[in-house]
Image (spheres, grey):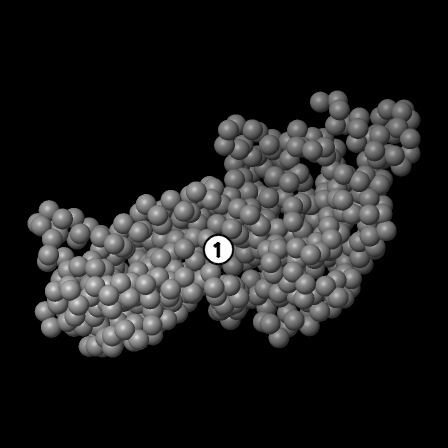
Amino acid sequence: MQNTPALEVKNVEKTYTGGTHALKGVTLTVPQGDFFALLGPNGAGKTTLIGIITSLVNKTNGKVKVFGHDIDTELEEAKAYIGLVGQEVNFNPFEKPMDIVVNQAGYYGIPRSVAIPRTEQLLKDLGLWDKKDKNAMQLSGGMKRRLMIARALVHQPKFLILDEPTAGVDVELRRSMWDYLQNLTRGGTTILLTTHYLEEAEQLAKHVAIVNKGAIVAEGTMDEILATYQEKDHGKYKAGKLESIFLALTSQS
Amino acid sequence: MPLEKLWISFYTIVRKDTIRQFRVWSQTFLPSVVTSVLYFLVFGAIIGDRIQDFGEFSYIHFIIPGLVMLAVVTNSFSNVAFTFFTGKFFSRNIDEILVSPTPPWLLIAGYVAGGMVRGIITGALVILVSLFFALPPLEHPGVLILFLVLSSMIFSLAGLINGIYAKNFDGITIVPTFVLTPLVYLGGVFYSVSMLPELWRSLTFLNPIFYLINGFRYGFLGITDVSLGLSVAVLLALTAILVGINWYMIKTGLGLRQ
């Protein structure tokens, strides 16, 4: 189990009703304990891929395994490992943060006697404790994002998937979220992150994959990606400038 | 998931929905009670005396089972259809369950149980209200409870199909208005099927609500238009079909996943 990747995606394809070919044979592996950044422009297929991994989207072809569990045959086992922070706010705005997080634990079979103290700690850690009894609709944008992180963490997942978690979040809060996520990886949690803030990926990720028009166009460790493209293009890109590499790769095709 | 975890997940779905029902009691429980009071006033206290008795029973006694059933059916259906649809379409918080290891059959069981809670509580409230107008006899309480459970379960299952499949708000209002209400009113709430011409009587036998009202009326009054065994068999078959459709829709993501 130690060597089993947190995520294996093999030749995954997705064609939506209507014909949009969103994923064209995506293959990638996320090792356990990794902080993996999945980058790409809008419409590249990142959210579709996350939807397939979390079973919110049906794939057309290919295989997905989470900690060795095939989502076609062992879906419930696979889902038990995953915590998801989706791109869109998706909780009931009339519920209280405390209830949202405790109920989420319930769906994973965690008794309330365990879920309540765990939720209290998460809300304190994420700066939401004084809002625990407010309606979720009264939270600011940044608070809603943090509430989604608390909800995704309440069952202590080994694999946390974050789809643009810092979108629309101010710089100070974004930095504090980075620290929080880095602490999680130090504790052994594997993280898959999509973001449009490339300095965020550069700062946090060990591995990176760049997806464009439904296909992976670059994959490796952050250092490899930066170095490879520097060599290939004879120093065309400035060292450490992921943004330049990203733009070159995603605007070519 | 081990049995204990399955139970916790089920309990969470039902608890959440039940708390919501009580929080918005004026939208969930009260409307059916008010409607029933109006029916009891009009058909019982005001014009009931001018309507011929049904055998040994007064007209208000005759319609009490149907009115209770009307409340159970509509509340069970709309509770599940509405909560599932809003969770899917507006707040998208249905994802909270879909990403969890909660299996499809448990999601169905949880939502249906939530609908049954509302249907049965509302039905009990309508029975309580009826006591102010006429004390109904209670011939077979076991049969009454059986049909209360069956009716709330069947229409919670039907409501879930509606909630899963609906693509817009019209999709969850059309079925109750144009399908459910006619079926209820033509299922024998206000009359006995024996009063109908042959053709209409035959058509009534195709209406599942007729069997619910029939069984429920037997529980109260001890009278029936068709055999109790046939009613139970039809309703159990219908339950199995609705469970199958729900399971298929949730398992394959039909109407839920892209």
Residue A30 lies, in percent from the top left, at: 70, 46
Residue under numbered circle 1 = B83
Position of residue B65 in the picture relative to residue A74 (left or right): left
Number of dots carrying numbers: 1
- Report whether B249 appears left or right of A142: left
Q: Residue at x 62, y 75 (%)?
A: A113
Query: Where A76 falls versus A39 (above or below)?
Result: below
Q: Residue lying farthest top?
A: A252
Q: Residue at x 30, y 57 (%)?
A: B239
> Could you tell me the amino acid type at mark 1?
Thr
Give the x, y percent position of residue B23. Answer: 53, 66
Inspect this view and state whether residue A193 appears.
Answer: no
Relative vertical location of residue B180 with respect to residue B143 in this rendering, above or below: above
**The residue positioned farthest toward the left in the image shown:** B198
Judge by depth and name the residue closer to the eye, A195 or A95.
Answer: A95
Question: Which chain is disc 1 placed on?
Answer: B
Identify whether A224 is placed above or below B216: above
Left or right of A7 on screen, residue B244: left
Mark 1 neighbour density, 10 Å: few (under 14) some (14–19) many (20 or more)? some
Nearer to us in this view, B153 or B69: B69
Residue under the point 80% across and 26% down: A248
**Residue depicted at 66% across the width and 58% down the height:** A136
Q: Element at badge 1?
A: helix
Quarter of the image for residue A44 reads top right
Using the rendered image of the protein, determine whether residue A76 is visible from the camera's viewpoint. Answer: yes
Q: Position of residue B214 (x, y in %)?
A: 20, 63
Q: Nearer the viewer, residue B51 or A134?
A: B51
Q: Residue B56: give x, y in percent of width and height.
A: 11, 73
